[in-house]
Amino acid sequence: MTYDLTSTLDPDTVPDDWFVERMTIIRDRLLVASDWTQLPDTPADKTAWAAYRQALRDFPSTWTPGPTVTFPTPPSTTTGQ
C-alpha cells in the first residue's frame, strides 16, 4: 500500500518530522484495523497477520522520510473455507 503524504504540498518545503508524523498516523491506523486478526476465535491466519503487524511496527526503522510511503502488504483475509 502506497500513500502520498503531501498531496497538495510542495515536498521540498516539508520537514522530515512532518513526514514521520503522517507515516506514524497511517501505520497506527493500519495496526488498529488489523487488531481483529489476533482475537482467539478469528478465522484469519494468525501467524501471517502477526508477521504483518510486526512488519508495521518495524517499518519506521527502515523507512527514509519522504513524500510517499509504501507499507507491507497485508495477508489475504480469506480462510480457504
Image: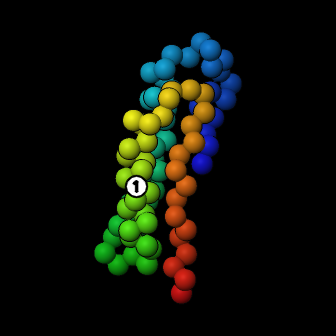
Look at 45% across and 28% down and name the residue there.
20
Crowding near pointer 1: few (<14 within 10 Å), some, many (20+)? many
For mark 1, give the secondary structure. helix
Eyeballing the image, is 10 above or below 79?
A: above
Residue 2 image point, x, y percent: 62, 43
Look at 42% across and 50% down and name the residue there.
55
The answer to which image quadrant residue 4 occupies is top right
Residue 66 image point, x, y percent: 56, 26
Q: Residue furthest left?
A: 40
Eyeballing the image, is 32 above or below 38?
A: above
Look at 47% across and 50% down and name the residue there.
30
Residue 72 image point, x, y percent: 52, 50
Examine the rendering and report whether any part of residue 36 can be seen: no
Q: Amino acid at mark 1?
A: Arg
Eyeballing the image, is 36 above or below 28?
A: below
Residue tagged 1: 53
Total labels drawn = 1
Q: Residue furthest top?
A: 13
Q: Nearer the viewer, residue 67 or 29?
A: 67
Residue 1 image point, x, y percent: 60, 48
Examine the rendering and report whether any part of residue 34 can be seen: yes
Query: Would residue 29 be found to the left or right of residue 14 on screen?
Result: left
